[in-house]
Image: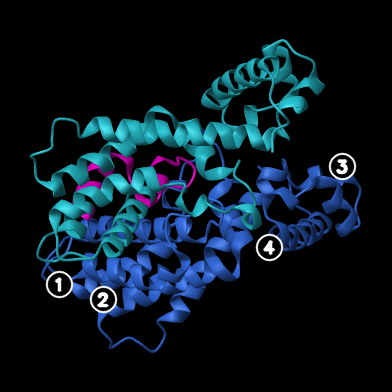
Chain colours: A cyan, B blue
Amino acid sequence: MSPKSTPKKDALRAKLLEVAEAEIENGGIVALRARDLANEAGCALGAIYTVFGDLGEIAIEINRRTMLQIADHLRGSIEGMENEDPGDMIITLAQAYRSYAEDQPQRWRTLFSIGLPPADSAEGFYDALAPITNLFAEQLDRLTRLSTTSERNRNARAIFSCVHGMISLGEEPRLSAMDPRDLDRMISRVVGTLCDKDQKL
Amino acid sequence: MSPKSTPKKDALRAKLLEVAEAEIENGGIVALRARDLANEAGCALGAIYTVFGDLGEIAIEINRRTMLQIADHLRGSIEGMENEDPGDMIITLAQAYRSYAEDQPQRWRTLFSIGLPPADSAEGFYDALAPITNLFAEQLDRLTRLSTTSERNRNARAIFSCVHGMISLGEEPRLSAMDPRDLDRMISRVVGTLCDKDQKL
């Protein structure tokens, strides 16, 4: 928990998060260093710990923002497509997720690499990706009204996880399983197959 | 490149790898520390660098072993199943990949997190996962003889990447998108759908 807030502490907190966000965006989690943060925010090193428990808490907060940014980006990608085929919209969401990963590689990697509470205090984090997977579930809902909400939700999470896996192994230059040039086509084909009306999950 | 080998250096190299392998297996990449390595191998700190360029080189070597271990584990999982349905065998391979990730979480995470050469010297690493994806391709080959080898290979990589994505987001307690209790069922359904003879990728 963060210490009790005052206007001065709130301002420091906001400044530190702004600096940390830029550092993670440019250099990933390894670029988040207390001394640099304090220097750039113009505060003493110890002042960081008057507003945050530790650097991990800052990373968690940036990860929350990243999550919302991804959800916004995905929502924007299907704006105005409301009457189109829901299967096509799921493919559009998947491609938008790839474009976020390409445009913000450091934020995207940080989200999945570090900065979340350890498992034993992770309550609520099972649903951390829900703002994203819900967008997939909404379209699955339009695709088939036969399945239950929980079933659609599970399928949406599975489809998102498949897309995430392909992108992870395509965008990781050090250990690629997917040829990046094939990625868009394979994402479309996999999502198309998994969403097919006659042969759905 | 490693320095020129001599019997004494080869023995030190083998000992350091043995110690490093145990450290990564127990504590992941963060457990790989030069001072601990030297202590446990009974050598001077500087001696490490007479046989390895840096710690990253050691991690790469352990990752190579992990890759072979996974391929062996997957191969073992389908032993004696040669006459069974290839779609079922691909599901078996996928489930075996999950069981490796569960049994060796630190080795598995290290493989995907760090310890490979940077992109600009990554020649040949595009195929690092080939021993694993080839096992999937062999079964796709039995499933359909209509597609070309390169098509089957691409599909095998896509199916593996989907399975990897579901496991990654199911086994990561800090940011789970998949309910681990659902994982086996969803892996089977996704792989089954992607491999379906009539509705294949």
Task: Give the quarter of the image for residue B155.
Answer: bottom left
Mark in the foreground, 2 or 3: 2
- Asked if marks 1 and 3 fall on the same chain, the answer is yes
Q: Which mark is residue B25?
A: 4
Marks 2 and 1, how far apart at CA = 9 Å
Marks 4 and 3, how far apart at CA = 24 Å
Q: Nearer the viewer, residue A175 or A192?
A: A192
Image quadrant occupied by the N terminus of chain A: top right
Categorize mark 2 by other alpha carbons within 10 Å: few (<14), some (14-19), many (20+): many
List x then y, in percent, for residue B106.
63, 59
Amino acid type at image mark 1: Lys
* Among the two numbered marks 2 and 1 on one chain, the one whose residue lies closer to the N terminus: 2
Q: Which mark is residue A16?
A: none
Q: Which mark is residue B87?
A: 2
Identify the subunit bearing mark 3.
B
Q: Which residue is mark 3?
A: B46
Q: Nearer the viewer, residue A83 or B143?
A: A83
Categorize mark 4 by other alpha carbons within 10 Å: few (<14), some (14-19), many (20+): many
List x then y, in percent, for residue B80.
39, 89
List x then y, in percent, for residue A196.
13, 59
Task: Give the quarter of the image for residue B199.
Answer: bottom left
Amino acid type at image mark 3: Gly
Residue B165 painted magenta: no
* Among the two numbered marks 2 and 4 on one chain, the one whose residue lies closer to the N terminus: 4
Residue for point 35% across, 36% down: A71
